[in-house]
Image (spheres, rainbow, N blue to C red):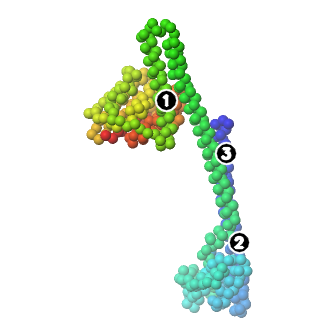
């Protein structure tokens, strides 16, 4: 499956997931709205029944529309006569239970002689408990001389409880969607890692083929009879074999060190070393391409000589690879009282801001411009970061696209 196909599949899957989520939210809202309308309608009918029964008991004529809804959970009922609290409680509970309004509610009776709510009580059709409520919290009206008010403080809870099945099914769908999204993420991540590992194997094979080919040619020359009569040439080919073996050993050690660092099993052979001496030995093969600049009074530091050499070699090698024109790299070592810093600076192509953190990720390589074919494993800077972290030093990067980069390592003394 091509990368473009996977991208379209990801976009299509994301759109489907969003569609499912939006549809579920829409249906839950619709279900809540439907339950709200049904509740209000049942409450309206139940209160009309209560008003009719009270009118019969009081011997008055019932108005055409005695029930008025002031707000989503607040109703007023016109009675045209005084209302007895005990009788009102009995009629309301019977009517609410008849219309399946099993919930808590509050009732307040208006007294026109005093122009205030004279009775406030919290009741429930779920049990026989009741408790008084503050009469000052009720809304009064001048429309009716005799009325009582009813409000439902737990209306939202009642609605939620009535659509538990819808909410439960929606939750299951969302959980399934989340698992699908996670599985898709894992699949895409595994494919990406597979591609990265494939590229790494290809790069590793290509990089190892070069020293192997050089060693094979040198071995053929050393195996000839004429080489025995040419000591200088013999020495030179032996030196070539030793250098290539050392190069291969460094590459293998770097890969093994990365694996150990990921498993927190990287062990350092710490020694007291002279940074200037070690760095000079690393820079010697590069000749005039690299310049060493020192500042301050040198002090020895605790470090692993092998990994420190590999780390500096990686930084210098990268600086040369990604330089334009005639490359020139400057290595600066600055000694201060409590710390020293080692920096590798070049005037190459630089690194774009969006890549400056990613380049320290394993296998990551920038493939743009006219340097997309630069050889490498994509683990050099990741290795540098791991070694700096293992030494508990600090690594920083300063880079401007088109002007060059500076990698700086701060080492406490």
Q: Dot 1: within a 10 Å radius of its alpha carbon, few (fewer than 14), some, or many (20 or more) residues?
A: some
Cβ atoms at labels 3 and 1 below 8 Å apart: no
Above/below status of 158 relative to 390: below
> Where does the image place residue 8, in percent across and percent down from the top left?
66, 41
Q: Tell me the quadrant of the picture where the C terminus can be found.
A: top left
Q: Dot 2: within a 10 Å radius of its alpha carbon, few (fewer than 14), some, or many (20 or more) residues?
A: few
Reading the image, the residue beneath label 3 is 12
Reading the image, the residue beneath label 1 is 251
For the residues labelled 3 and 1, the Cα–Cα distance comes to 42 Å
> Where does the image place residue 293, in percent across and percent down from the top left?
32, 28
Point 58% across, 84% down: residue: 131
Q: Dot 3: within a 10 Å radius of its alpha carbon, few (fewer than 14), some, or many (20 or more) residues?
A: few
For the residues labelled 1 and 2, the Cα–Cα distance comes to 75 Å
The dot on residue 38 is 2
Tag 3 secondary structure: helix
Tag 1 secondary structure: helix
Point 61% across, 46% down: residue: 185
Point 42% across, 11% down: residue: 232
Dot in front, 3 or 1: 1
Can the viewer see residue 341 in this picture? Answer: no
Above/below status of 215 relative to 125: above
For the residues labelled 2 and 3, the Cα–Cα distance comes to 38 Å
């Amino acid at each position: 499956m091509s990368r473009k196909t996977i991208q379209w599949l990801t976009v299509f899957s994301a759109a489907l997931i969003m569609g499912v989520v939006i549809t579920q939210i829409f249906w839950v809202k619709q279900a809540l709205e439907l339950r709200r309308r049904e509740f209000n309608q049942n409450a309206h009918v139940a209160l009309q029944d209560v008003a009719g029964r009270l009118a019969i008991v009081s011997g008055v004529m019932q108005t055409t529309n005695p029930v008025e809804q002031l707000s989503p959970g607040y109703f007023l009922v016109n009675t045209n006569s005084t209302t007895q609290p005990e009788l009102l409680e009995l009629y309301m509970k019977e009517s609410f239970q008849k219309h399946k309004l099993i919930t808590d509610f509050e009732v307040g009776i208006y007294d026109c002689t005093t122009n205030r709510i004279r009775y406030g009580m919290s009741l429930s059709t779920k049990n026989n408990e009741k408790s008084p409520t503050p009469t000052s919290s009720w809304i009064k009206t001048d429309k009716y001389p005799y009325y009582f008010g009813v409000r439902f403080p737990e209306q939202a809870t009642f609605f939620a409880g009535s659509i538990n099945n819808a909410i439960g099914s929606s939750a299951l769908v969302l959980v399934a969607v989340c698992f699908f999204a996670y599985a898709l993420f894992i699949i895409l991540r595994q494919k990406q890692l597979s591609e990265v590992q494939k590229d790494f194997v290809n790069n590793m094979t290509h990089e190892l083929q070069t020293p192997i080919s050089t060693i094979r040619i040198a071995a053929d020359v050393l195996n000839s009879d004429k080489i025995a009569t040419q000591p200088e040439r013999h020495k030179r080919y032996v030196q070539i074999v030793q250098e290539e073996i050392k190069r291969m050993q460094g590459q293998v050690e770097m890969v093994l060190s990365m694996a150990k660092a990921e498993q927190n099993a990287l062990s350092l052979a710490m020694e007291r070393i002279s940074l200037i001496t070690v760095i000079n030995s690393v820079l010697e093969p590069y000749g005039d391409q690299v310049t060493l600049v020192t500042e301050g009074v040198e002090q020895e530091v605790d470090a692993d000589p092998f990994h420190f050499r590999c780390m500096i070699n990686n930084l210098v090698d990268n600086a040369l690879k990604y330089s334009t024109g005639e490359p020139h790299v400057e290595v600066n070592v600055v000694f201060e009282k409590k710390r020293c810093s080692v920096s590798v600076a070049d005037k190459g192509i630089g690194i774009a801001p969006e890549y400056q953190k990613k380049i320290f990720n394993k296998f990551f390589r920038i493939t743009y411009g006219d340097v997309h074919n630069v050889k490498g494993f994509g683990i050099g800077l990741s290795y540098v970061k791991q070694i700096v972290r293992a030494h508990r030093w600090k690594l920083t990067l300063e880079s401007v696209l088109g002007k060059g980069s500076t990698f700086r390592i701060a080492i406490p003394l």
